[in-house]
Image: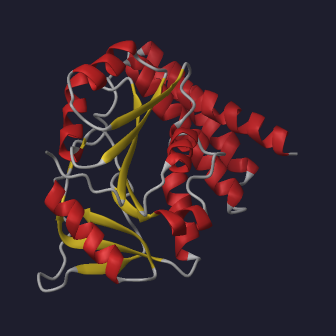
Amino acid sequence: MKKNYKDITVILTLYKTPINKLNNLLNYKNYKILIFDQGGNVSTKRYLRNKLNLDIKYFSSKENIGLTRSSNFLLSKVKSKYCLFTQPDISIYDKSIKILKNIITKKKNLILVAPNHKKKLKKKIDYKIEKKIDFSCALFDVKKLKKIGFFDEDFFLYWEDIFLERKINLSKFKMAIANKAKVKHNSSQSSKKSYKTEYIRRLNFMYGELVFDFKLKKLRLLKILRKLIQNSFLFVFNILFFQLKEAIGNVARIIGLFKFINFYIKKY
């Protein structure tokens, strides 16, 4: 009979996730798992329920609602003291999760502890307080996280973690990296690679960058015009030289600019 650590819930979002990446969820066999599948995939749901013998609660949407909204939704469903926010292309073992929990339990002002992504820390220390954290995998104190707020839903896919990082640094809470908690991250492999997913990523990276600058009151009209002219010129150049992937990237960034303009108009 497997042991269930009820004080930790694992939460993660999916979007066109390759089936083989779902096997990483087996690392969380001792925990309750909450999943939000953006654009709900029938084959993914079937695989999770029939092939993996795990304690999973599955949620989905017909459309891609974005990482921020889906993550906030999952957080609202968490009843445990801690939650491990992670991604399907992350591999972290039970031993490392226990290390994270031991640290966050002992240090009262910690809101989160992240595993060591090959960061060089002194071997003698168990953890180090940091201003910058890799949010792809982190153990959060749920009560503190709900108090300060998770991701800002004005973002969609990118920059929401940097904004949250800034918010935490301005608060009384601290973040730490656990020296001995190891993790493997196959970056950008949580979704199937295609022109569509790449288009969505580049569009929302541009959009998120502008939203971030706007919220920090650093955005200037000149930056928007410069990026619009730059990507328009590069689009023509890449089309002429048959650089289709780069041309799609230019279109995505231009659409990202207009997505931000629409966001700005709605705000005012």
Residue in view at x 23 percent, y 61 percent: 97
Q: Is residue 170 left or right of residue 258?
A: left
Residue 63, given in percent of the width and then of the height, sits at 56, 21
Q: Quadrant of residue 258?
A: top right
Residue in view at x 18 percent, y 73 percent: 120
Q: Which residue ends up furthest to the bottom in the rendered image?
A: 124
Q: Which residue ends up furthest to the front in the rendered image?
A: 1
Residue 259, given in percent of the width and then of the height, sits at 68, 32
- Asked whether the viewer can see residue 166, the reply is yes
- From this view, report whether residue 43 is shown above or below residue 29: above
- Asked whether the viewer can see residue 117, the reply is no
Q: Is residue 105 left or right of residue 50?
A: right
Q: Is residue 82 left or right of residue 192?
A: right
Residue 168, given in percent of the width and then of the height, sits at 53, 71
Q: Quadrant of residue 180?
A: bottom left
Number of marks drawn? 0
**The C terminus - image quarter:** top right
Toward the viewer: 60 or 265?
60
What colour scheme governs how the chains and residues are painted in the rendered image of this protein? Answer: secondary structure
Residue 250, given in percent of the width and then of the height, sits at 52, 27
Residue in view at x 25 percent, y 31 percent: 22
**The N terminus - image quarter:** top left
- From this view, report whether residue 172 is shown above or below residue 116: below
Toward the viewer: 243 or 261?
261
Residue in view at x 37 percent, y 83 percent: 107
- From this view, report whether residue 163 is shown above or below residue 45: below
